[in-house]
Image (cartoon, grey):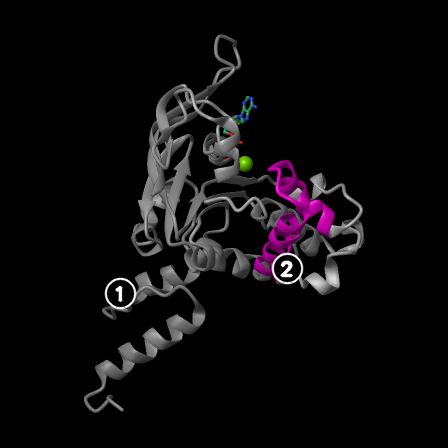
């Protein structure tokens, strides 16, 4: 099961002098159990695309299918909003309850679950965001650090137990350490829960390290879609769109030009291993 985006186009300000073609014939898939990244510079259509996945925006043409439910036809809006969880930019701005637990229970409560079920959901969602229930459930969300607030806000969406999670620039404004922690937690979600995760980002480095598939957006068009290895094997294409490629991919390509072929590396550790292997493979008695 997956979300299928099919030839999707969207315009803002139709019939006005301010018409913007925000999406132009975009097609790709978000599979369950995978982390799909959308990358592109500001204004390339990433947020517009994200907002189509749970029906917040309606296609001008083309379709969005969520597990076979066509969002351009009549459909159950509440069911889709539960199925596809949406984490907006700076989601902590929407925290409002007096305790972390109450805030996270807000969604499950609206689903009509009893108190015990709500609490179970909250505990599990906090687990997924590495927030200890004992330590944080009864604290005020307003006393937490920026990174913790954001994790509480994301836990609130996870407590709805969606089948898909869409995150729009989830690490924006966090310091490097909080950012890395959050990305590690997001990376684990598809594996631990089986949900399909779509993450909007403008960091190529993050995408290379964390995404299973990447969709590259450029002025409303889908420039490339594939695995990080596929997408980062064509630096010219990305550079034309004003996007760089991750430093490790650049190093790998430079080495290839010099006659040394390395496998694709997601992390510096992987790069070091691949480089060592390639060097050992070159020496006549290189094998250990
Ligand atoms: P990104 O998230 O990649 O920065 P957006 O999806 O926000 O891109 O924007 C894509 C294009 O649509 C931009 O040209 C932007 O100015 C325009 N746009 C976005 N939202 C609106 C809106 N609500 N009304 C009019 N134009 C919009
Ligand atoms: Mg955006």
Q: Is residue 90 visible?
A: no
Q: Is residue 141 above or below residue 64?
A: below
Q: Is residue 105 left or right of residue 248?
A: right
Residue 178, disc: 2
Q: Is residue 281 left or right of residue 176?
A: left
In the image shown, does 123 or 114 lie closer to the viewer? 114
Q: Is residue 83 above or below residue 249?
A: above
Is ligand 1 within 8 Å of the beta carbon of the residue shown at mark 1?
no
Residue 106 sits inside the magenta stretch: yes
The residue shown at (41%, 38%) is 217
Q: Is residue 17 left or right of residue 244?
A: right
The residue shown at (62%, 38%) is 112
Mark 1 → mark 2, Cα distance in angstroms: 35 Å
The answer to which quarter of the image holds residue 73 is top left
The residues colored magenta run: 101-130
The answer to which quarter of the image holds residue 266 is bottom left
In the image shown, does 150 or 189 lie closer to the viewer? 189
Q: Earlier in the sequence, mark 1 or mark 2?
A: 2
Alpha-carbon neighbours of circle 1 within 10 Å: few (<14), some, or many (≥20)?
few
| Residue 6, x across and y down, in percent | 32, 30
Q: Is residue 66 above or below residue 204?
A: above
Residue 256, disc: 1
| Residue 61, x across and y down, in percent | 36, 20
Residue 128 sits inside the magenta stretch: yes
| Residue 177, x across and y down, in percent | 63, 63
Q: Is residue 177 above or below residue 32?
A: below
Label 2 element class: helix
């Amino acid at each position: 099961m997956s979300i299928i985006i099919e030839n999707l186009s969207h315009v803002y300000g139709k019939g006005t002098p301010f018409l913007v073609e925000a999406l132009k014939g975009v097609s790709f898939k978000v599979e369950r159990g995978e982390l799909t990244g959308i990358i592109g510079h500001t204004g390339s259509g990433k947020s517009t695309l994200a907002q189509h996945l749970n029906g917040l925006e309606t296609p001008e043409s083309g379709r969005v299918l969520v597990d076979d439910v066509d969002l351009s036809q009549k459909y159950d809006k509440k069911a889709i909003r539960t199925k596809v969880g949406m984490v907006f930019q700076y989601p902590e701005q929407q925290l409002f309850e007096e305790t972390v637990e109450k805030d996270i229970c807000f969604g499950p409560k609206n689903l009509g679950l009893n108190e015990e079920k709500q609490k179970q959901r909250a505990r599990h969602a906090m687990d997924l965001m590495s927030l200890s229930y004992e330590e944080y459930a009864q604290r005020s969300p307003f006393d937490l650090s920026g990174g913790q607030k954001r994790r509480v806000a994301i836990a609130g969406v996870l407590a709805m137990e969606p089948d898909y999670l869409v995150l729009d620039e989830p690490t924006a404004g966090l310091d490097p350490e909080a950012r890395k922690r959050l990305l590690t937690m997001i990376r684990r979600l598809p594996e631990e829960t089986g949900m399909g995760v779509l993450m909007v980002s403008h960091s190529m480095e993050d995408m290379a390290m964390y995404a299973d598939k990447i969709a590259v957006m450029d002025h409303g068009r889908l420039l490339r879609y594939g695995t990080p290895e596929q997408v980062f094997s064509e630096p010219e294409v990305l550079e034309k769109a004003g996007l760089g490629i991750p430093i490790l991919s650049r190093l790998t390509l430079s080495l290839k030009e010099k006659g040394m072929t390395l496998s694709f590396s997601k992390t510096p550790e992987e790069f070091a291993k691949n480089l060592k292997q390639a060097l050992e493979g070159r020496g006549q008695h290189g094998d250990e």
